[in-house]
Amino acid sequence: MSTRKSLFEKVWERHVVVPETAETPAVLYVDLHLVHEVTSPQAFDVLRSRGLKVRRLDRTLATMDHSTPTDTAQVFGGLPIRLESAAKQVHQLEMNCAEFGVNLLGLRDDRRGIVHVIGPELGATQPGKTIVCGDSHTSTHGAFGALAFGIGTTEVGYVLATQCLLQRQPKSLAIDVAGRLPAGVTAKDLVLAIIGRIGVNGGTGHVIEYRGPAIEALSMDERMTVCNMSIEAGARAGMIAPDATTFDYLQGRPYAPQGDAWEAAVADWATLRSDDGATYDERVAIDTGALEPMITFGTNPGMVTNIGGVVPDRPGDTVFARSLAYMGLQPGDRLVDKSVQVVFIGSCTNGRLSDLEAAAGVLRGRKVARGVRVLVVPGSQQVKRQAEERGLAQVFLDAGAEWRESGCSMCLGMNGDLVDAGQYCVSTSNRNFEGRQGIGARTLLASPAAAAAAAIRGHVTDPREFLG
Amino acid sequence: MEPITVIRSRTVVMPSTNIDTDQIIPARFLTTTVRDGLGVSLFADWRYDETGQPRADFVLNQPQSRGCQILVAGRNIGCGSSREHAPWALLDYGFRAVISTGIADIFRNNSLKNGLLPVVVDEATHAWLVAHPGVEVAIDLPAASLRLPDGREARFPIDAFARYCLMNGIDELGYLLNQLPAIERHEQSRGVR
C-alpha cells in the first residue's frame, strides 16, 4: 500500500473507528457537530423516543440562522418574530438545547451567525477535524483542511447519539489551480468557473482537494468561498491544505488551542498536506490566466458565463430551454443589459468581513440606482460589529442599502426575506435554483463586487469598471 | 420503517436533469418540526399555480400518475440542499423508489435512511423508461435488480449494509450504538479527552 497520502486520506484515516468491509461501511468519528434549527428538531425527537442523550456535549455546538429574522426590531427590539412557523422552530431549538444541555448561541447571543461563518470565526473549525452539520454548505469548513460535509436529519440524530457516522470512503478529486487570479477576479468567480467547467454533478461521490499556487495565495475568507460551493459541483466535501495563512487566522480565537497546546497543534496541522506523489481518483487543471468575473444565467450554478458574455444556446436541450424561460432570457442575450430589481449581499458563501469590504469598496461614495432594493446581511453578529466599527455599515446605509442582523436571509428566504416573482436578483449566495429566493424569483449568482456594481447601475455590470 | 423486498408499480416520469431538493420541497415548508405531512407540498411550485390550484400540465396532477410509487427522474436528482424533507415529502406523497442515471450523494443517503429506494441504472435502461412512462416495473431489492415489462433486467448498485437495513426495516442507529466500546477506545487512543 502506498505510503504517499493525500490530505483527505490523512484526515479520513485519523477518524476511522471501525474500518469498512464489503458488508459494512466504516464507522467514522466526528470531531465537531454543528446544529441549527431547521434540520435538528426531528433528530432530537429520535433521542427522546429512544431515551438517548447527546453523547458529546463538548463536541456539539448549536446556533440559529436559517429561519431567524434579520430585522433588528424582531431580533433585539422585543417585536415577535413575524413568521409564526419560524418563531416556533426557533423556540423548539431553544427547548431542545435546554433539555439536552447543548451549548446554544441563541438569537440574541453576540456570537450568533450563520453556522458556517461562526465555526471558523470562533476557532472551532480546525485543520484535521471531521465536521458535520445538517446543512450542505458544511463543505465551507474544508478551507481549513478539515473534512467537513453536510448530512441529513437522521444522521444528525446518529451523531448526537454516538458522535459517529457510517460512511463509505469517498473518491478523491484534485483540482489544480495554477497561476494567480487576475485583477478584479475573485474567489467566487473562480469557484463559479470551476463548477461551470466540471458541472453540477462533476464532483459527485468525491472529496475535492483544491491545490496549487492560486489557491495558496487566497485568504481564509476566499478559501471558504471556494470550499463552500464544492457542494454545487455535487462534491461530498472540498478541502484545502492548512498553511501559515490558516494558522494565522486561527491563532487567538476563542476555541483554538492556546499556549503549548497551540504549538503542538500547529506542528501536527503542518503535516496535513498531500504527500508528493499522492494519487487521486480524478484530476482537473484550471488555468487562471483567462478567468474573468462570472455570473450565472440559469437555474443551477453550472449555468454560468463571463459577466461580459452572452447567454449560450443549446439547441434541442429542453431542460436548458425551460431554465432560460424561467429566467426570462434568450440565447444570445447580453447579461450586462439585464436590469435588476434586487441585490443580496450576504450568505455563508460571501457574508464575511472581506466580502462586505469588497462590496463597500464599490459602493463607497455612490448611490444605489432608483428602484433597486439592496439587502446587506452580515454572516454573523461579529461580522456585523466589525463592519460597523470599520465604517462599512455606514457606506451601505449612505448608498441606500438596507443593513440587517445576521442570518441566511435571502439566500433561501426561509425567514421571509424574499425576492418577488419575476424580479432579477444579483445575489452573492450559492444557489440560483427556481424559487430559491422566492416563488418566481430570478437569481443571478455573482461576487460581492459584481453585486455592488449592479446595485449602482441598476443592471448587471462588470465590477472592474469600478476598480481603482 | 416497513421492510422492502419487491416494489412493483407503474412509473411517473420527470425527465428533467438536476432536479434539486428546493424543487422537491421548497424552503418555506422547512419550518416544520415534524417529519409528516410534507406530501401535499411535494414539488409545490411545479404542482400548483399562484392561486394554489393544481397545474393540469404537471405530471403528478394527471390521472395516470395516481397511485404510482416509482419516480423516474433525469440525471442528478436531489442535488443541492441536504434537507431530508425531500425524501420525507416523496415518501409522504406515496413514492417508494426513485430511478435515475445519477442521484446526488446527500439525497441518496437521506433516502436510504428513510426507506426511499434510490436506483441508479444505465443510460439505455433509463432512456427506455423515459420513453415509456407509466409502465409497470418491479424493483427487486434482494436481487438488486430492476425488471422491465419485457422481462429485461437491469442491475443497480446498492451498499450491502444499506440493503440489509432496508430489507429488514431497521435503521442504522442500533448498529452504531453497538459500536460504543470501539468508539470509546478510539477516543482514548487518540487522546481526544
Image (cartoon, grey):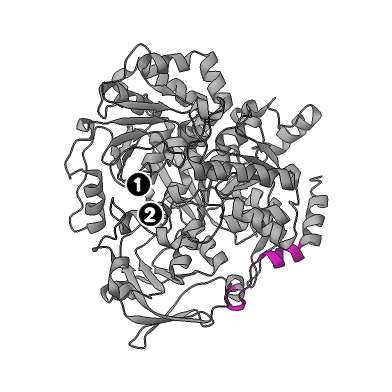
- Residue A185 spot, x, y in % from top left: 37, 29
Residue B148, can we see it?
A: yes
Q: Quadrant of the C terminus of chain B?
A: top right
In contact (CB < 8 Å): disc 2 and disc 1: yes
Q: Secondary structure at mark 1?
A: loop
For the residue pair B147 and A115, the one nearer the viewer reads as: A115
Question: Compared with residue A463, is residue B93 higher up or lower down, i.e. above or below?
Answer: below
Q: Quadrant of residue B9?
A: bottom left
Q: What residue appears at the point 19 percent right and 31 percent down from the top-left corner? A: A337
Name the chief secondary structure element in magenta: helix
For the residue pair A155 and A104, the one nearer the viewer reads as: A104
Residue picked out by circle 1? A435
Going by the numbered disc 1, the residue's amino acid type is: Gly
Q: How many marks?
A: 2
- Residue B158 spot, x, y in % from top left: 52, 72
Pointer 1 indicates a residue of which chain?
Answer: A
Residue picked out by circle 2? B23
- Residue B109 spot, x, y in % from top left: 53, 61
Pointer 2 indicates a residue of which chain?
Answer: B
